[in-house]
Image (cartoon, rainbow, N blue to C red):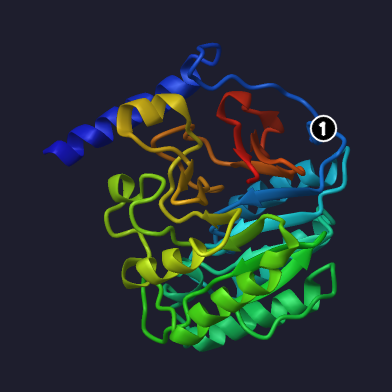
């Protein structure tokens, strides 16, 4: 009964954030060109999640391409496009290729940081999960505009000197909860340790959030990293200025209103780690701005990381939902 009541309240909150755009706590928007807020930006990246491409639903391919056109028209160079998983609906080869091909054709960013999600690995219906991961790797290597190659679906890359580590389900029989072998967890630790002495922010991209962060336990009780969560968090907390970027639970962009009512936000700092949970790009969101096409423009400066809320589909900023995280 209480769960149903919370869902109703969440729906009302989502509607309020779009019906009353001028309210102090609600979703004002500005139709402005995609450009960095300041000129001294060190890293300019567009971050989205949950694209859910399905070649049997062509409108979704158009919606994805339309959002990338927003990036392509940017006044400033987009250093990276970051997609935190669920690239496809069912992980089929045709949809995965379509996802990548649309990005390649758009020329929207100089680098890609792409993670697989549960729909890309756990929900595959036509072949083994390991084959789906290999096809992901092959497409990344053949189309990535930077020319960088990866060997596995979990990997590391550096962009403008900033370290990115991408995590992935590496089990053989999983569905919605990823399985991470000890080798991958060690890879995460080693990759962060290797770059820690640069004294720059480091970014970990994983489709599924850690347990209890960004409202995961409220939005979807079984939507976290489960048995892997404690191990991942322990590694993240060893280092300063780590940002953990996830998606999966389909929460909307939110801020003070949702935080006051439900006690969580899509950007949180816990035990020194900065957690960012992204809305779904393709499907309706909850507990915040409900529309598709939403994400953040992440601008990294010397003393802060700015997350500027944007609807890439309609080319509008939502400044009320901007989040600034200081660099310590």
- Residue 37: horizontal and vertical position, in percent? 78, 31
Q: Quadrant of residue 66?
A: top right
Relative to 104, 320 lies left or right: left
Q: Is residue 50 visible?
A: no
Q: Quadrant of residue 104?
A: bottom right
Question: Residue 65 versus residue 81: which sits nearer the camera?
Answer: 81
Up-down relation of residue 292 to residue 10 (above or below): below
Label 1: how many residues lie within 10 Å, few (<14), some (14-19) or many (20+)? few
Relative to 285, 230 lies left or right: left
Question: Residue 202 versus residue 226: which sits nearer the camera?
Answer: 202
Q: Is residue 327 visible?
A: yes
Question: Residue 79 versus residue 135: which sits nearer the camera?
Answer: 79
Up-down relation of residue 320 to residue 92 (above or below): above
- Residue 257: horizontal and vertical position, in percent? 41, 24
Up-down relation of residue 152 to residue 210 (above or below): below
At mark 1, the secondary structure is loop
- Residue 178: horizontal and vertical position, in percent? 41, 73
Q: Which residue is mark 1?
A: 38
- Residue 126: horizontal and vertical position, in percent? 47, 83
């Amino acid at each position: 009964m209480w769960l149903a009541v919370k869902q109703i309240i969440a729906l009302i909150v989502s509607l309020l954030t779009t019906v009353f755009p001028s309210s102090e706590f609600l979703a004002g928007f500005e139709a402005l060109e995609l450009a960095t807020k300041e000129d001294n930006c060190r890293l300019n990246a567009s971050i989205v999640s949950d694209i859910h491409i399905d070649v049997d639903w062509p409108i979704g391919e158009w919606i994805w391409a339309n959002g990338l056109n927003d990036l392509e028209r940017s006044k400033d160079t987009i250093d990276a496009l970051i997609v935190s998983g669920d690239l496809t609906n069912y992980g089929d080869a045709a949809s995965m290729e379509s996802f990548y091909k649309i990005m390649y054709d758009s020329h929207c960013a100089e680098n890609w940081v792409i993670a697989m999600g549960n729909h890309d690995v756990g929900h595959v219906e036509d072949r083994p999960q390991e084959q789906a991961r290999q096809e992901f790797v092959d497409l990344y290597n053949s189309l990535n505009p930077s020319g960088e190659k990866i060997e596995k679906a979990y990997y590391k890359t550096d962009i403008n000197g900033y370290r990115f580590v991408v995590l992935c389900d590496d089990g053989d029989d999983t569905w919605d909860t990823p399985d991470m072998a000890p080798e991958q967890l060690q890879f995460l630790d080693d990759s962060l340790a290797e770059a820690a002495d640069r004294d720059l922010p480091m970014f970990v991209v994983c489709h599924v959030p850690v347990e209890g962060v960004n409202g995961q336990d409220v939005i979807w009780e079984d939507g976290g990293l489960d048995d892997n969560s404690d191990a991942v968090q322990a590694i993240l907390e060893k280092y300063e200025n780590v940002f953990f970027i996830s998606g999966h639970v389909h929460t909307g962009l939110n801020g003070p209103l949702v935080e006051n009512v439900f006690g969580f936000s899509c950007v949180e700092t816990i035990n020194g780690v900065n957690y960012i949970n992204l809305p779904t790009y393709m499907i309706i969101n909850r507990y915040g701005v409900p529309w598709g096409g939403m994400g953040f423009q992440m601008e990294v400066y010397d003393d802060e990381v700015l997350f500027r809320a944007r609807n890439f589909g309609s080319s509008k900023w939502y400044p009320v939902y901007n989040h600034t995280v200081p660099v310590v």
